[in-house]
Image (cartoon, grey):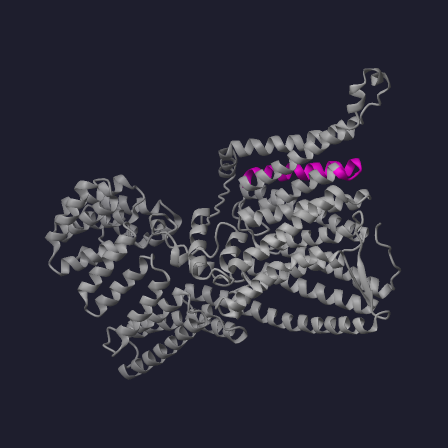
Amino acid sequence: MPPQQQTVAPRSRSLETISIWALLATLVVAIFFFLPSSIVPFATTKTFLLAAGALITLALYILARLGRGNVIFPPLALVGALWLPVVAYAVSATFSGTLFSNALWGSALEPDTLGFILVATVLGTLSALVLRRPEHYQLFLRVGAYVFGVLTALQALIVIIGQFSPGTVSPAFSIPGSFNDLGVLLGFGVIGILITLRFLGLSGRTRQLLSIAGVVSLVLLAIANSPLIWTLIALVSLGLFVEAVMQRGTKTVESDLDETAIMNETPVEAGESSHSLLVPLAVLAISLFFLIGGTLGDALANALHINILNVRPSWQSTLAVGQNVYASSPVFGTGPGTFGVEWLKHRDAALNATVFWNVDFSSGIGFIPTSLVTTGIVGIIGWLAFFGLFLVLGMRLLILRAPQDAFARYVSIFSFVAAVYFFAVTIFDLPNTVIIALAFVFAGLFISSTRFAGGGEQWGIIFAKSPRLGFVIVFLLTILLLASVGAAYALVGRYIAASQLATASSAFSSGDLDAADKAAQNSIAFAPSAAAYQIEAGIASSRLDKIAVSTTMTPTAAQQAFQTALSGGINAALTATRITPSDYQNWLALGNLYSKAVPLGVAGAYDSAKTAYQKAQALNPTNPQIPYILAQLDIANKNIKGAEDNLKTAITLKQDYTAAIFLLSQLEVQDGNVKDALAAALAAAYFTPNDPNILFQVGILRAATNDFAGAIVALSSAITVNPQFANARYFLSAVYAKQGDFKSAAAQMQAIADMSADNAHMVASQLAALSAGKNPFPANLLSVSPAPVK
């Protein structure tokens, strides 16, 4: 039997209504929020809005319950299951050995943190507790339908405007955060429309509006063209089609067996029956069409100038990292938010041959696989227990004890499918925090609807009738209310710190050291973080460079300023290494500061810098940049043999590392080994004549011996093999200019500029000089720096 409804006081009812609207506002604002600014962290703001909304809704719910004098719960088995992942995260954060504050907050409440999982679970639990009546469900779903309609219309408008006025808005701009996240929401909307049309009686106008929204969504989905989303839509469409056929068949099967009953057979309702069959069948056909012809969607996106890039580690790479983690920390994992650290330790060096060689991935193939890696066996138990209970109990309810009321049954089916859909996305993809929160919210909505199932019931406690238990519950609710206030204070401080950190990073990138320093200090004041101290160390390093080349400071003032900046920078870098010792970039920042003192002959500077760099190398052993930096340190310390060894290590890790190839060539020339180096390079070119990196090295070494004609041949061959080899074109341009062939030199520089707008900006001065018949390169070609291009 459905739970009996009780009369409530107006004030309590108003607080309940406000808490429902607070929950809705949290989700709506998180979906639509965006600011056209690089200073305010976009994704971070959405996450913090979810957290703030969860705390506000929680506080309103507690006040409503205290005002009403009771608490009411749906069946508790699934509510408890919802909290199993949080328990797993808490256990892992406590016993994995990682710093608890890092596991709780991360740098900005990233998905794989205890803090965010707690936020998502609170939102899901509040959905189960706050949404209790059919009118609550109606409000929630009606607002959701309006939100989906507005989102679809706005996104279609953005794509259209972007075709005619890309300067106003990019056609690739996505309101939810990325086009991939937009595809997830659109797929959810299409599935929701299919379920609504099948199980809910609607007016003709409402059906038309939903159909229009569905068609527009399918067009946008064709642009996003996610195989995962098409697969999930196809599965739901197939299920609805089969269900509709079975339901339709029950009305005619017996009459078909009795030929004498044909004359008395009542025709099946043509409109409803054909509609419930044709719509899922049409959507199934469209899904299969784009799954089979995957390039069609890509062609459509390219035609509309929408480039969708979704780069993440493969299943193989994720599993490889997981195997190494479980070999060393099987029970509790390495702790929430540590996948990036483990990825760098165990990633395949073959990635150095790709364009993503210097990308530090912080997640695996999907959110759930990432979580299973970082939280260990306790994470596996938590997630599997939750999914097992949710799927088994949910399917059992829908099959054996589905609500008798049509609307309640529709809510149960819709919320269950929605939760499964969103959780499937978290397994196979890396959605943003809003998508993950929606998975928990719809799981909570389904849990709430179980009170209307056959044999289902809700239970509650009236404080006045159970004084002792009521006192305990009131006390706990009061403590939870006060804790939410404290959490809100910490949340605001963390968000301000993240915003100031983004400001500091932007100012530092633009060269405004004072503004960057002020913003970094503000960030530290609200919430000390390794990233903020890392920026402080970078600021100190930049100031040291300025002091070293200053012509206005007296030697005494320069020495004092140098010591002050160096001391402050080292302290900041050391603090960063203490906060997050597993971040290799903190150790690089420390090593960079110590290395500034090496040319000055400061005692211990070289050893301290080398130790810091070696710790960074231990954390990121396949990164070719670190041995290259070590080689530069050895050069500053006049250890040429050590520098050559480190450069060879860098080249072994990344065979097309042109900066290391060029620097090694310079050292070999300085060491008088040009002929031997050239002979070795020519021998390598003989066996691999189409390797552009070897041809590049041959060209550099021939230029070192003043064999400019040979250098031109080698560098031209490298370009023939790889026309996008910007560094080869850059040095070829320098060789042409050395010989006075400014026309050919300008042609090579123009080819570099045509590769991208950034390249055009970088080589603008050299191109202008060559076009004017002037040589912008130094007389010694080996002193030419590698091309500052991408």
Q: Quadrant of residue 221?
A: top right
- Apparent side of residue 44 relative to residue 767 in the rendered image (left or right): right
Query: Residue, x 67% and y 70% (percent of image)?
Result: 484
Establish if 102 lies above or below 342.
Answer: below
Question: Which residue range is magenta in the image?
Answer: 199-226
Q: Quadrant of residue 246?
A: top right
- Apparent side of residue 759 relative to residue 217 in the rendered image (left or right): left
Query: Residue, x 20% and y 57% (percent of image)?
Result: 664
Query: Residue, x 80% and y 56% (percent of image)?
Result: 458
- Apparent side of residue 339 relative to residue 90 in the rendered image (left or right): left
User: 611 or 72, which lies in front?
Assistant: 72
Q: Quadrant of residue 9?
A: bottom right
User: 356 or 788, which lies in front?
Assistant: 356
Give the prevailing secondary structure in the magenta stretch: helix
In the rendered image, residue 641 lying in the magenta stretch gets the answer no
Establish if 12 lies above or below 306.
Answer: below
- Apparent side of residue 429 relative to residue 392 in the rendered image (left or right): left
Confirm whether residue 785 shows in the render.
Answer: no
| Residue 690: % across, % down | 24, 40
User: 167 or 787, which lies in front?
Assistant: 787
